[in-house]
Image (spheres, rainbow, N blue to C red):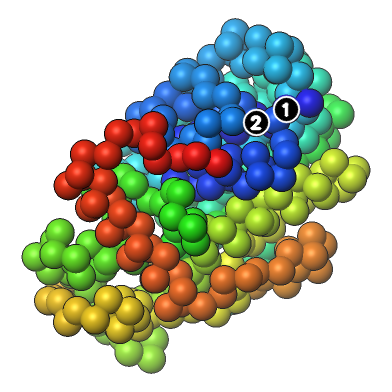
Amino acid sequence: MSVLITGGAGYIGSHMALDLVEAGEEVVVLDNLTTGFDWAVPHTAELVIGNADDQQLLGDLIKDKNINAIIHFAGSIVVPESIADPLGYYANNTVTSRALIESAVAGGVENFIFSSTAAVYGLPDTNPVKETANLAPISPYGSSKMMTEIMLADTAIANDFRYVALRYFNVAGADPVGRSGQSTPHATHLIKVACQTALGMRPHIDVFGSDYPTPDGTCVRDYIHVSDLVRAHRDALAYLRGDGVSQVFNCGYGRGFSVREVIASVKRVSGVDFDVRQAEDRPGDPASLIAAAERIRDVLSWQPQLDDLDTIVTHALDWERHLLERKTKAVKPHEMADA
């Protein structure tokens, strides 16, 4: 029996592949390598280069590799990009997910874990935000994920099919032992951008907005370490295999840090006092977005182990140094990801 990971050569997916391989699972990674990297996939996982909406390929993989669970990471994730290209996001996120879900049902795959997002909440009225809060996304990215959640719920009613949708808050950090991390060169994640600025890869960092109704006027977010997030997926897989009913869970720690607090952490950990500049706020940014995380702890018995901002920053900074060293020394790709 094997687990199929779509987008398993990307940031979170590669961490998931490493985790499952270490747990003794047979892992098949499906990735078109548009934003992922073949070297990020552990050697003992099988990498299939292709698209997650290729139903002929999916049908063959499910049958030939005896797939009994799918963890779906593949998709586009940049909010401003989704606003500029909504149809592209609905195609790559919603339409692709539909094809994958249909292939899972046709192939008899009963267990499905979906990479969702806190963007489905839009601008919540209260924080921390619970899973039962109104879904009101304000971007095509959030809408595309919400549509997939709706499809999963309807499919589970009509078929022998169970799912867990995990709504991520702000994922950051890297594998503590340095095997994988956020490797997209122009990623927009705050912690990655701040680490790159500390290492001299960017001349400065912009802080968008200073008059939000938060303690220091900058946006507050709930940052979760990628390894703790992967652990939530593993717990969700065990839950589904144990005949757990379909569920939706927030993935966060239940507390937030402001933009300025994150920048202060990066300066503290790196020892570099880099240039920080004030910029105009970005329309649609919630002032605060923090997860109500009780449900995932209660139902899945999920226990985060890396709930510390400086630890998250340390691992992210170490990974950026590693990427710089890799670029400087032209390390061969196959030397990187040995599970």
C-alpha distance separating marks 1 and 2:
6 Å
- Which mark sits nearer the N-terminus, 1 or 2? 1
Going by the numbered disc 1, the residue's amino acid type is Ser
Quarter of the image that includes the C terminus = top right
| 159 up-or-down from 188: above or below | above
Going by the numbered disc 2, the residue's amino acid type is Val
Residue named by callout 1:
2
Residue named by callout 2:
27
Residue 277 % position (x, y):
13, 76
| 42 up-or-down from 265: above or below | above
Residue ranking furthest to the bottom: 215
Residue 216 % position (x, y):
32, 89
Does residue 245 appear in this view?
no
Quarter of the image that includes the N terminus = top right
Q: Secondary structure at mark 2?
A: strand
Q: Residue at x 82, y 44 (%)?
A: 240
| 300 up-or-down from 333: above or below | below
Q: Secondary structure at mark 1?
A: strand
**Figure quadrant of residue 104:** top right
Residue ranking furthest to the right: 243
Q: State if disc 2 and disc 1 touch (CB < 8 Å).
A: yes
Camera-nearest residue between 16 and 165: 16
Q: Residue at x 52, y 66 (%)?
A: 224
| 273 up-or-down from 178: above or below | below
Label 2 Cα crowd, 10 Å radius (few <14 / some 14-19 / many 20+)? many
Q: Residue at x 33, y 65 (%)?
A: 317
